[in-house]
Image (cartoon, coloured by chain):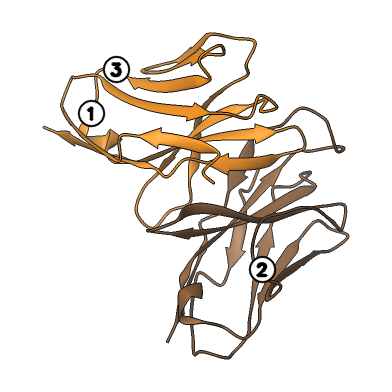
Chain colours: A orange, B brown
Amino acid sequence: QQQVKQSPQSLIVQKGGISIINCAYENTAFDYFPWYQQFPGKGPALLIAIRPDVSEKKEGRFTISFNKSAKQFSLHIMDSQPGDSATYFCAASIPGNQFYFGTGTSLTVIP
Amino acid sequence: KAGVTQTPRYLIKTRGQQVTLSCSPISGHRSVSWYQQTPGQGLQFLFEYFSETQRNKGNFPGRFSGRQFSNSRSEMNVSTLELGDSALYLCASSLSKVQGEVSNEQFFGPGTRLTVL
């Protein structure tokens, strides 16, 4: 059973556009929701993360929107650049660092 | 601070063999988790070690095992390799303290690419 459901599986965006990736979860025990960026041949790198007591967090061009009642959270990449082309994973953790990952979204930003 | 390091980076084994992968966490991090990443299944949690004890375990067969040393370095072992074990094995470390505390940032190593022939 997939604890965290991620969509879309792939995404193509024009340079300068907004990339939006969505995730949904069921377990209300999750207390931490990170997003990871992974380039081919590399391990995932922590991009941005949020805790459930906050509805939005912004770091540069990356924003997490969190809807606790709907059990959904999303990543928004503003002014998308070709260098953002990568696979993005959402995740959720229960206290004590047991993480569950979404299946990933392959983002391609076209120049 | 040095990041999470994993050795070796690449391994080729044949069915039936066993393999040991190594992970050195970020200095000061006591929690080490292992994941299997495949194109079809994504990132699957194997187990997590904290203070030399397995604290959490995913849904993998007993052929997958691990251990953690007093310096927080961790090893993962897979016995009787199967073709389906071909994957990228990722290690992640975290500044975790005790069970039940709020979750903390987890930092990944570059992974070990295991190919089983």
Q: List the residue tagged with mark 2.
A: B22
Snapshot quadrant of residue A13: top left
The extreme front residue here reads A1
- To which chain does the residue with label 3 belong? A
**Amino acid carrying mark 2 in the image:** Ser
Q: Quadrant of residue B78?
A: bottom right
Residue placed at 75% from the left, 32% from the top? A95
- Location of mark 3 (residue): A78
Q: Is residue B104 left or right of residue A20?
A: right
Residue B61 occupies quadrant: bottom right
**Callout 3 environment at 10 Å: few (<14), some (14 to 19), or many (20+)?**
some
Any mark on residue A81, and which? Answer: 1
Residue B70 point in image, percent of width and height: 88, 60
Q: Residues within 10 Å of mark 2 (few under 14, many from 20)?
A: many
Q: Identify the residue at horizontal 47%, vertical 27% (top origin).
A: A24
Q: Position of residue B95 (x, y in %)?
A: 75, 38
In this picture, residue B35 sits left or right of residue B11: right
Name the quadrant of the C terminus of chain A.
Answer: top left
Q: A20 above or below B25?
A: above
Kindly indicate whether the residue at mark 1 contacts the one at mark 3 (C-beta within 8 angstroms): no
Q: Which of the pair A45/B88 is nearer the observer?
A: B88
Q: CA distance from mark 2 to mark 1?
A: 35 Å
Q: CA distance from mark 3 to mark 1?
A: 9 Å
- Chain holding disc 1: A
Q: Indicate left or right for A42 with B23 as reference.
A: left
Residue A28's tag is none
Judged by depth in the image, the label closer to the viewer, 3 or 1, is 3
Q: Amino acid at mark 3?
A: Met
B107 in relation to A12, above or below: below
Classify B34 as above or below B114.
Answer: above
- Check disc 3 and report its element: helix, strand or loop: loop
